[in-house]
Image: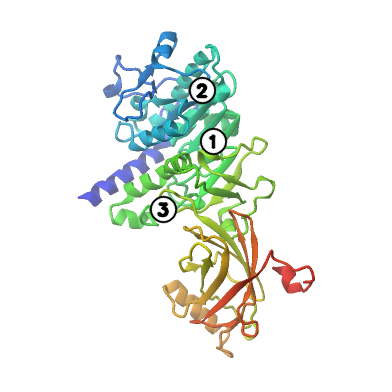
Amino acid sequence: MRKSVSLFCFWSIYCCFAAGSHTPMGPEGQLEDEPHKSKEVQDATKPSVRFNLRTSKDPEHEGCYLSLGHNRVLEDCGFNMTAKTFFIIHGWTMSGILENWLHKLVSALQMREKDANVVVVDWLPLAHQLYTDAVNNTRVVGHNVARMLDWLQGEDDFSLGNVHLIGYSLGAHVAGYAGNFVKGTVGRITGLDPAGPMFEGADINKRLSPDDADFVDVLHTYTRSFGLSIGIQMPVGHIDIYPNGGDFQPGCGFNDVLGSIAYGTITEVVKCEHERAVHLFVDSLVNQDKPSFAFQCTDSNRFKKGICLSCRKNRCNSIGYNVKKMRNKRNTKMYLKTRAGMPFRVYHYQMKVHIFSYKNKGELQPTFYVTLYGTNADSQILPLEVVEQIELNATNTFLVYTEEDLGDLLKIKLTWERTSQSWYSLWKELRSYLSQPSNPSRELHIRRIRVKSGETQRKLTFCAEDPENTSISPGQELWFHKCREGWRMKNETSPTVELA
């Protein structure tokens, strides 16, 4: 029964998204300014959009509702005109109630910024609709938020520059509309996995964009290059950060949609990966001493190759609340790896390995693993992920990451896997053998491994433990010890070193 319900929920979501072309809209496809409400939610005693100032850390506490034009309410609620003001904007909802993530975010903000105003924008009556109707309502809600901000600007000491709008899913686009409609410029907007359906490829005035605030940062955690993408894929901020490539998040179950449907877990996977953006932001608030760093890169594949671990010219940045403003840039794409839970921080390493082949002229695709040994701890056995293919007699770059802080690296163990662990690996082995039938011997030579830490930017060179024995074959291992700081010695001029 559970599988059937989950599958039904998934297809209900998909059909709602896919029905965008049949949605009632304004002239020329414009989003209407009148809210779409079903008869069940048309309650004259309850506003469609409410602003709840959270005055207690207790999630059960009702808080204090701000009312446009009522100055006395601001005083009674204890609104601090000179402090930072956060507006948290939820997205589309199937349950019709505020989700647990919102209470966690409120609590984290209150803990980090004790004097700040934390306001929850409650638009549940307009969000608990068919997805397409909720999309049309985002413009209306954005107008409401803008009007509230315009009214607050009329009060002494209130500054729009101190306002930070935090929107999740559809709420990110509500924040974009609010920033577009308000008189003046909002200080910051954070988009937490902005919704994709009906916004992907849309004009900048119909979605979140860098023009909506002085600084717009975005976390993308549920994008897909195929099938249904819940989160928007395109960059929509000054900085767009794609944790784990922006698609499959660790700890969120099955890595394929069909498998998730078969096991009845698709709704849990969607929720986990889409909501991961919120928890990464919460993590940045509560684990300030363990910040996660992202690195500028043109695409996910280049990042997976370990090419993009530079911090020069602001190419790396903290994520979440601690991100540094980069207002001169637009649509800067950044990537990082994370753990499956809090604290999400990992430690990134770029590994440059020059692989020599004296006996093999055909294609050879070894499966390598490394173990890193440091002053604080030793890593687990880490795969050297091959994004395209390993080049022989050339420098190959890999990305590895550890969940532990290893301290200063001392030595590296490189292992060539003997047996295949999958049909794909078996096919690679067979293809390598068939490409060189005259010489079935498989042997490679590796003299040095160059390592760069993404978090410290420190460069180290590791040399083979035995300079006379640099060969490795399937089932064997090679040890490398730190032999110097940096990657090059002053007198090294060989072409091999220049390639590395």
- Horizontal and vertical percent position of residue 84: 51, 25
Q: Nearer the viewer, residue 49 or 87?
A: 87
Q: Position of residue 225 (x, y in %)?
A: 49, 51
C-alpha separation, residue under disc 2 versus residue under disc 1: 35 Å
* Horizontal side, residue 106 vs residue 491: left or right: left
On screen, residue 297 versus residue 136, left or right, reads: right
* Residue 97: image location, x then y, percent: 30, 31
Tell me: residue 126, above or below residue 246: above
Q: What is the residue that sits farthest to the front in this orientation?
A: 375
Q: Which residue bears the numbered disc 2?
A: 83
**Mark 3 is on which residue type?**
Ala
Residue drawn at the location 46% of the way across and 80% of the way down: 418
Crowdedness near tag 3: few (<14), some (14–19) or many (≥20) residues, C-alpha within 10 Å: some
**How many marks on residues?**
3
Residue at the spot 49% in from the left edge and 81% down from the top edge:
430
Closer mark to the observer between disc 2 and disc 3 = 2
Q: Which residue is mark 1?
A: 202
Label 3, label 1: how far apart the Cα atoms are: 32 Å
Q: Nearer the viewer, mark 2 or mark 1?
A: 2
| Residue under numbered circle 3 | 340
Q: Quadrant of the C terminus?
A: bottom right
